[in-house]
Amino acid sequence: MATDTAGLLDPRELRALETLRLRPSRTYRGASKGERISKQKGVSIEFADFRNYSEGDDLRHLDWNVLARLDTPVMRTYQDEEDLVLYVCLDATASMAFGEPTKLDIARKLAMAFGYVGLIGGDGVRLKVVGAKQPPSGILRGRSSAFRLMDSIQRVADENVAETLNDGLRSILRSNLRNGILLMISDGLDPELPATIRAFGGRGFEVWHTQVLSDAEIDPDLEGDLRLLDAEGSGSTEITINRDTLQQYRVALDNHIAAISEAARRTGGHHLVFRTSDEIEKVFLRKLKPAGWFE
């Protein structure tokens, strides 16, 4: 039965997501017991090691004998199962406030959708908001954690901070996170983003990027003399919009999107441009699943 996440996803979208599971391109082994059978051949089901219990762990793998003797909860881990963590990096910087609905409105729905698929598939999910005064969540696990994830996402953008997308991502890169899927949900308009994605790849992360853009950004319908304001800075530029200017803009945008896509691909990940007018259900089932994001 689908979990109620009213306010972000409707029942039809939830029913569609119930059929999906994250499909990483590699095997991840970490601190927690996972629910994914390893792709490695010749590995049998056998005990591997102990580790400390952490909130959200499956109590079926708690070692009750150790708990009784030492009054310390520890978990048993196994060699043939994967532990995947999906790091959801949600862009709440100033540029995401553009459009109607805003890019941030759509990004929040996408964060919930991806996170929900991870949770119901037994994977760990951790939310990090870039551009808002909101500490990272702990690693959430299990269907019941969907409510906590939803609450964290709905609180996004209550208080913004002066932070660029690239600065926020670089701070994550400097933290001591173990490898997993790093999902970026952003407009991706920071020119330094491809280099940052390559840096995450160098650290062993598989980067998935859902680039949320408004129809007006993809196909602008403007003309005349305009003053453009930097949403994430104090600068402005006066330009004259004509056919040549629009053509140059489209070429620059296409080149930037291609650079992001190539950087993500080199990490073993994926990239998709998601218009604010797109429907989540259709994109997830008709584009992302056939492209290998889900199984």
Image: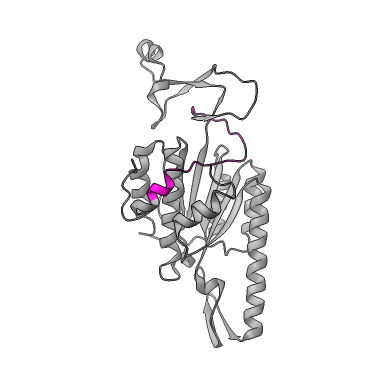
Residue 190 image offset from top left, x and y in percent: 58, 63
Quadrant assignment, res 57:
top left
Specify whether residue 134 is painted magenta.
no
Classified by dominant secondary structure, the portion drawn in magenta counts as loop
Residue 74 image offset from top left, x and y in percent: 43, 20
The type of colouring in the image is one colour
Quadrant assignment, res 133:
bottom left
Depth check, front residue: 4 or 193: 4
At horizontal 45% and vertical 70% (from top left) the residue drawn is 98
Residue 143 image offset from top left, x and y in percent: 37, 38
Specify whether residue 27 is painted magenta.
yes
At horizontal 45% and vertical 35% (from top left) the residue drawn is 122
Establish if 52 lies above or below 22. above
Establish if 205 lies above or below 44. below
Q: Is residue 136 visible?
A: no
Viewed as shown, does residue 219 lie left or right of 62? right
Split into 4 quadrants, where in the image is the N terminus?
top left
At horizontal 42% and vertical 56% (from top left) the residue drawn is 108
Establish if 36 lies above or below 214. above
Q: Which residues are magenta?
A: 14-33
Depth check, front residue: 28 or 53: 28
Q: How many marks?
A: 0
Establish if 277 lies above or below 48. below
Residue 66 image offset from top left, x and y in percent: 41, 13
Viewed as shown, does residue 152 lie left or right of 92? left
Depth check, front residue: 73 or 243: 243
